[in-house]
Image (spheres, grey):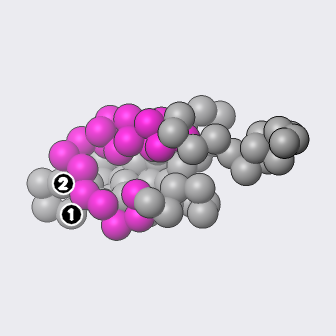
Amino acid sequence: MFNAYVIEAGNEAAGIVIREGHRFRFHSSSRRYWDLEGRYFRKPHDAQRAAIDLIALRPARASRALVRP
């Protein structure tokens, strides 16, 4: 089993998880995923699901800029 995994969400790298004992700690690759920074997950798949859920709740700033009041 590997000690580190790249976590992808959509078409981008959200960060990496690194094994610490029996769990994995998330390290974000961009500000968009800072809410997950330092969180622990049982499996890398759990971190990936969390990253995907996070971007589903909070679209990219660029797409919000296209909406005019």
Identify the residue shown where x is 53% and y is 34%: 56
Q: Is residue 54 magenta?
A: yes
Q: Amino acid at mark 1?
A: Glu
Identify the residue shown where x is 29% and y is 39%: 46
- Percent from the top left, x then y, of residue 29? 57, 60
Are the residues tagged 2 and 1 within 8 Å (C-beta)? yes
What segment is highlighted magenta in the picture?
Answer: 36-55
In this rendered view, identify the residue nearer to me: 38 or 17: 38
Identify the residue shown where x is 69% and y is 45%: 60
- Percent from the top left, x then y, of residue 30? 61, 60
Task: Judge whether residue 48 can be spotted in this image.
Answer: no
Identify the residue shown where x is 40% and y is 57%: 36
Looking at the magenta stretch, what is its main secondary structure? helix
**Residue at which label 2 appears:** 23
The quadrant the C terminus occupies is: top right
For residue 17, side relative to residue 65 (left or right): left
For residue 57, side relative to residue 45 (left or right): right
Q: Amino acid at mark 2?
A: Arg
Mark-to-mark CA distance, 2 and 1: 6 Å
SS of the residue at dot 1? strand
For residue 2, side relative to residue 27 (left or right): left
Image mark for residue 51:
none
| Neighbourhood count class around disc 1 (C-alpha, 10 Å): few under 14, some 14–19, many 20 upward | few
**Residue at which label 1 appears:** 20
Q: Quadrant of residue 63?
A: top right
SS of the residue at dot 2? strand
- Percent from the top left, x then y, of residue 62? 79, 47
- Percent from the top left, x then y, of residue 67? 83, 39
The quadrant the N terminus occupies is: top left
In this rendered view, identify the residue nearer to me: 49 or 35: 35
- Looking at the image, residue 10 lies above or below residue 5: above
